[in-house]
Amino acid sequence: MMDRISLRKMKFYAYHGHVEMERNSGVNIEVDAEIFLNLKKAMKTDDLKDTVDYRSVYGVIKEVVMSNKYMLLERVLSKIIEALFASFAQVEGVKVSVRKNTPSLGGIVESVEVYAFRLRSQV
């Protein structure tokens, strides 16, 4: 069993979507992320250097979501996963979901979501 740090319901206004209006006007995006790593040392030392600073995790995710325009949520999801592994060597796994609230589907839908769980050995 791995330890984890979770960040839930991070909210961004970004420009992702297959529909041109979403890329031009923007949409509400939510991201949940769990990073799996060994927290045993941090539990003993109470020292930030022995864990991953979740402010940094938020910053990495915000950079991916806000600095690009993608057609698919799947691509946003992939880029977040890649960035988390690239930024934090001690992370052994990640679980990420990306939601688009009130998507343009021609009907009333609260949100659509894509989700993935990856281990470092899988990327």
Image (cartoon, grey):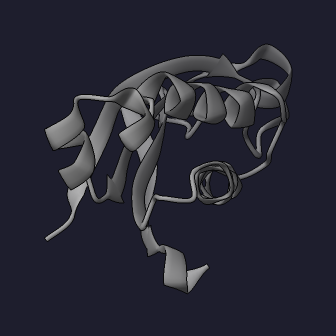
Residue 108 visible within the image: no
On screen, residue 113 above or below 49: below
| Residue extending furthest toward the bottom | 121
Residue 24 visible within the image: yes
On screen, residue 37 above or below 42: below
Residue 39: % across, % down: 24, 50
Q: Residue at x 42, y 59 (%)?
A: 94
Q: Is residue 71 left or right of residue 1?
A: right
In the rendered view of the protein, which quadrant contains the N terminus?
Answer: bottom left
Please state which of residues 109 and 114 is positioned toward the viewer in this rendering: 114
Please state which of residues 44 and 2 is positioned toward the viewer in this rendering: 44
Residue 58: % across, % down: 52, 27
Q: Is residue 41 left or right of residue 48?
A: left
Q: How many marks?
A: 0
In the rendered view of the protein, which quadrant contains the C terminus?
Answer: bottom right
Residue 48: % across, % down: 38, 29
On screen, residue 117 above or below 104: below
Q: Residue at x 48, y 58 (%)?
A: 90
Q: Residue at x 24, y 49 (%)?
A: 41
